[in-house]
Amino acid sequence: MSYLIQQTLIYAIPLMIVALAGVFAERSGIINLALEGIMIFGAFIGVLFVHVCQKYGVFELLPGAANWGSMQLFEILGMIMAGLLGSAFALLLGFAAINLKADQTISGTALNMLAPAIVLFFVRIIANQEELRLYKGDAAEWFMIKKGMLGLGEKDGFIVNTFLNKVYIATYLCIIIFVVCSIILYKTRFGLRLRSCGENPQAADSLGINVVKMRYSGIIFSGFLAGMGGFVYALTTSNCMSNGDVAGFGFLALAVMIFGNWKPLNIALAALLFGLFKCLAAGYSSIDINGDGIKLLFELSKHPTWGKVLNPNFYRMLPYLISLLVLAFTSKKSRAPKAEGIPYDKGQR
Amino acid sequence: MEQATSEAYPYVIEMLHITKEFPGIKANDDITLQLKRGEIHALLGENGAGKSTLMSVLFGLYQPEKGEIRKDGKVVEIKDPNDATALNIGMVHQHFKLVEVFTVLDNIILGAEDTKLGFIQKKEARKKVKALSEKYGLAIDMDAKVEDITVGMQQRVEILKMLYRDNDILIFDEPTAVLTPQEIEELMQIMRNLKAEGKSILFISHKLNEIMAVADRVTVLRKGKYVGTVDTASTNKEELSRMMVGRPVQLVVEKDEAKPKETILKIEGLSVPSKLHKNDAVKNVSLEVRAGEIVCIAGIDGNGQTEFVHALTGLEKPSAGKITLCGKDITKASIRKRSLTGMSHIPEDRHKHGMVLDFTLEQNLVLQRYFEPQFQSHGFIKFDAVREYADKLITEFDVRSGQGPVTKARSMSGGNQQKAIVAREFDRNMPLIVAVQPTRGLDVGAIEYIHSQLVKQRDEGRAVLLVSLELEEVMNLSDRILVMYEGEIVGELDPKTTTTQELGLYMAGAKRQDKEVKAE
Amino acid sequence: MKMRRFLNKDGTRSVLATLISILIGLFAGALIILIVGLADSKLGLDEAWKGIRLLFLGLFSKGQQAGSLIFGFNSTNIGDMLFRAVPIIMTGLSVSLAYKTGLFNIGASGQYLAGTTATLFIALKMNTAVIPPWIVWILAFLGGILAGAFWGAIPGMLKAFLNINEVLACIMTNWLAANIVTWMFEGSGLQCTEGTKTQVIWKTTHNGVATAKMGLDKLFPDSQQVDGGIIVAILIAILIYILLTKTTLGFELKACGSNRHAAKYAGIKDKRSIVLSMAIAGALAGAGASLYWLSGSTEFHWQTYLSLPGEGFRGIAVALLGACNPIANIFTGMFLSTLDVVGSKLSFYTGYNEYITDVIIAAIVYLSAFSLVIKTWLSKKFKAAEIKKIPDVLITSENAGNDAPPVPKNKGKEGNEK
């Protein structure tokens, strides 16, 4: 059970934060189809940052280098770097969509093509292979928090095992950021104005709100969250490795956003649901649901008749199938920001 | 001292010699407008005379090429709406600038939020809005979402937005277009209250009655040019309309008595479900239209007319009822079947339904008949035939465009787009013409043309079903009036014996005829 | 004067805009090569200069002697280029047709996979001892088309009946296809068992099925790959051009794509049109896959569930670069496959790798997203002198005020709400 919750969280958290990235862009009026690309780029930047710092021994220079606490700081720095450059990458979309009034779907697709190409180009030059890993060790060794570090080595409770053992600080940080960003979106002047630009930019403009500035803010926020989410994904699910791919995670985040109706709380729940499916696909063979030692899903996949359907292929496609079904059932009710995807033109009103 | 001089200066806002050009047109050409402190000043002109452009200049949405704006006698520069707000200028736009999914309160404070550390302080805002709404008698529900409230209340929200910003120069851009006669009266009273409180008001309209009723002075524009400014006390409607159009206006459409013949369209008990709420948008409507008469469905926007027309033309499915066209039951027929059975349709929204804007004019002209043998063989389009036909219609209906038949529809003016639609639909010579707001947003010349064409079609023996929101159009054009209120036909009136006031009462739901009476 | 009229033509401007996009893309690539060369001590300026020359002239590379590159006519390169152009011309046509009818087909990858699966199953499972190979070829080709059409129709139906954005539906069906294809081949018994190869499916030549060379092997004697596929692709491109511009069906599909509501008003069955557009688009992508695999010169890696075939996304580049004109797609497809050849030369002869060409392609797609801007800029440039000659009829009073001056909006936006 602990394992199931941990694994679900590992997949749900990046989905949640990247879906929120989508919200910031769309609430300001820009369709951010480039979430996938920004994630790929952010993942690369984060991994590269850690890789280079390791290579030149930057962290050995800091006091308490071997201390697990300073490693957490290292990890947070990686997240910030991924976020900042994610923002910079997203500005390409912002420029095309806001200044040039280009088709946002096409520019988003272009970024989705650009990110893996540019990442693989550099990965090949830097690592001379198709993937960039840490310079030494692996993510679990460097960044994972284990209960022993917290002085809880002997404790064996459910809470300790689930939430304080073998976890990454990134997970909890993302939850905090998610909450803070949701509050910004709903309780502050900035949030109110941002949302008005996605619904009725003409109205916002007539009230003296700078639509261009607001949309750029939205896309910068969006890029930061998606870039950071990309690194968190690479860190927690692929052992801090970058290979120019996040396996459609950015697109799943889009589905989560739509399923969550562009509202943070619903998105958090939707992300957990999708995280669960992703977790089933990745770890169906080692999940012990009720703790009786029988790995039910694994057994099922070996069953002569059930196994024909309930096999790894099935679990792998489940998130996409569910996405489609969810879209089919929610499309009538879903309410996208009214002005999303439409370039804002001052002359038109 | 400074205060004293500005109080003494009679004009609170002056726009002097304003010129604003768009590619190809001069929307404003040397226009001067002076607004006195504490007056209601009307700005009169046809659609497209340049009123909205002039107000957008004052509001900082456009920058003029020439001319200057003065506030209290001092030259000011208004680069964006923020500057306008800083000068205490506020505007109620013709199409409300409201965020539909926000609450009323959020809409009022948007752009002028009081914050502490970035967080919005709603309590104070709520107090201030409450005080304002009580002072001016503007009843609102602060926590309702804008999409759920009536148009009248939305307008009050717009007024409160200006008052919340302490504006004292208020611009009303065509504020009565969406209101019932009773709501209009209410608005007039609100404007008088605002004037009594010392606010100066600019009132943009093309409706002479309202201007005569509420304004102190009128400035008239025509085709982007300044015509003159007069006191309402020393003028009359005829003079104003002559100033507005530049020639004596034929206020009444010339037409003979209708000579109705056989029934063309028969509708029995038609109901249409609503997309917005659970109730039906159209409830049990029955009517008949005969050859050689114009039957008009009057009513305030949003009372089921759109859904009714959609069900009639096949764009939506009715939940009950029967439609018979030329003796054939078409209740379940496809759109094309209906159209071929004998129905032409001038749609309400020419950009949404009437035209494919990225197609050329000629493609749009054959949109309803490209599949006929005249224009195709074996699935291949006969381009020569299409061109010939388009040329014919263009000449016949005087459709003007930049490059003739190959002009992209998008680049044509609204009036000519509408003419093209009218040409396409009339030329099909169908026994029934459904015309929905055929003159919306057009200037007087185009309106007169389309009106005369409708009468001509009637005299040639077609049945015309006209849906209109304009009272004058209804009164002038129709042979019979059916009033629709909340999806029901609440009365049948004879334009020769009824009055605008009576019509207004039916439209507002204050009066209705019994079903028995109607059936006679 | 003649020159000006030529430059004022819409088509001319599109071609110019395309060429400008290509040039900017190539120079951006060259710039990256240069910067990386200067920054990385392993590469250096010489290597960068080599890379840049290959970037522009890679198609005519004849290898190198004593460390310096030799250029000249190379029939292997050109033959390979033509072969690799086939699938992306087809996916390009798929995206173009959808785009012209108001849909953004980002699902060509999935449709391509569907076509791949059907084609390979038919071509490898049918007994060529009983049925003549050329019949199997035709059946496999038709099978690919039908499978692609089916897979394309799914997002079409979701859009038409449930109003789901086709972009999202396509993305999901792409990944579904990737998983299903893996699943189907896993138990198919078609895995190649030759030598040490793993995770690949037999070439169709294993069963004696292959596309005819149609004389192209004589023209490009050194190329192992070139075959009649390119001729089929060009014929199909011409057919699609005729469909879109000359027929009533094309008229209906375009009307529906441009303004679904107006099309419906005019009695065109809007839902049927959307499904049909997507089905034809899918069929084209599926046909591309068929032509590619039926050549019998490459093997299919069947474990596709982690990534999607690049042909689908390159199709987007081919389509947009050619302004979604089917005839132009033939040339843009060949340009992109030239870049492909360039990429392999780059990783063969220099310290750079083929991904730089992907960067260039992505840059070109990005640029084509605002090709409208380039086009407007061009027309301003050439029209500056003529602006005063706007016909008087346009200057009517209705143009002002409420009927705001016509501003070009994004294509196909009005009325097509999400």
Image (cartoon, coloured by chain):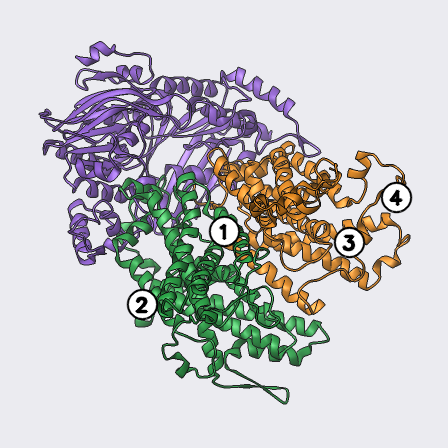
Colour displayed for chain B in the image of the structure: purple
Q: Residues within 10 Å of mark 4 (few under 14, many from 20)?
A: few
Residue A210 visible to the viewer: no
Question: In this figure, which residue is indicated by the disc labeled 4?
Answer: A148
Q: In the rendered view, would you say B307 is above or below A119?
A: above
Say if residue C87 shows up in the picture. Answer: yes
The numbered mark at residue A169 is: none
For badge 4, the amino acid type reads Gly
Q: Nearer the observer, disc 2 or disc 4?
A: 4
Give the Cα separation between the discs numbered 3 and 2.
64 Å
Q: Residue at x 89, y 54 (%)?
A: A66
Residue receiving disc 3: A139
Q: Are marks 3 and 2 on the same chain?
A: no
Q: Chain letter for orange, please.
A: A
Name the amino acid, label 2: Arg
Q: Earlier in the sequence, mark 4 or mark 1?
A: 1
**Which residue is found at the position 42% from the left and 55% from the top?**
C147
10 Å neighbourhood of mark 2: few (<14), some, or many (≥20)?
few
In contact (CB < 8 Å): disc 2 and disc 1: no
* First in residue order: circle 3 vs circle 1: 1
Quadrant containing the N terminus of chain A in the rendered view: top right
* Secondary element at tag 4: helix
Residue nearer the viewer, B421 or A63:
A63
Q: CA distance from mark 3 to mark 1?
A: 35 Å
From the top left corner, tell me how far across and down residue C102 is, in percent: 39, 50
Question: How far apart in space, not on screen, are marks 2 and 1 (Cα)?
Answer: 34 Å
Q: Can you say whether B310 is above or below A306 in the image?
A: above
x, y percent for residue B201: 44, 27
Distance from Cα at disc 4 to Cα at disc 1: 48 Å
Q: Which mark is residue A105?
A: 1
- Is the C-beta separation of discs 3 and 2 under 8 Å? no
Which image quadrant for residue B436?
Answer: top left
